[in-house]
Amino acid sequence: MAGAGSKIRPVDRLAQAVAKCGAESTAYGKCIVKDFNNVYKDKCLAEFQVLQSCVTKHMGKK
């Protein structure tokens, strides 16, 4: 049986996955900041989907 401290919290898993997606995070951030006074749903959808795919891959989910 694993010890209580050996389990990684979901937020920590997410942080580790996002940290491995620096280029994708930067591209999404630049898209949002380009016109941050006019942000709307799906504004940077393509960039977000690339980031989401990267994070999902590094979290070990399909």
Image (spheres, rainbow, N blue to C red):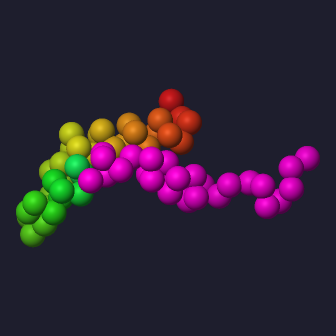
Q: Residue at x 26, y 53 (%)?
A: 26
Asked if residue 62 is positioned above or below residue 38 in the image, the reply reads above
In the image, residue 7 lies in the stretch drawn in magenta = yes
In the image, residue 16 lies in the stretch drawn in magenta = yes
Residue 4: % across, % down: 83, 59
Residue 25: % across, % down: 31, 52
Q: Magenta part of the protein: which range?
A: 1-26
- Most frequent secondary structure within the magenta stretch: helix
Residue 35: % across, % down: 8, 63
32 displayed left or right of 5: left
17 displayed left or right of 21: right
17 displayed left or right of 3: left
Q: Residue at x 50, y 40 (%)?
A: 58
Question: Residue lying furthest right in this view?
Answer: 1
Q: Quadrant of residue 11?
A: bottom right
Q: Quadrant of residue 24?
A: top left
Q: Residue at x 18, y 56 (%)?
A: 30
Residue 56: % across, % down: 46, 39
Question: Residue lying furthest bottom in this view?
Answer: 37
Q: Residue at x 47, y 35 (%)?
A: 57
24 displayed left or right of 32: right
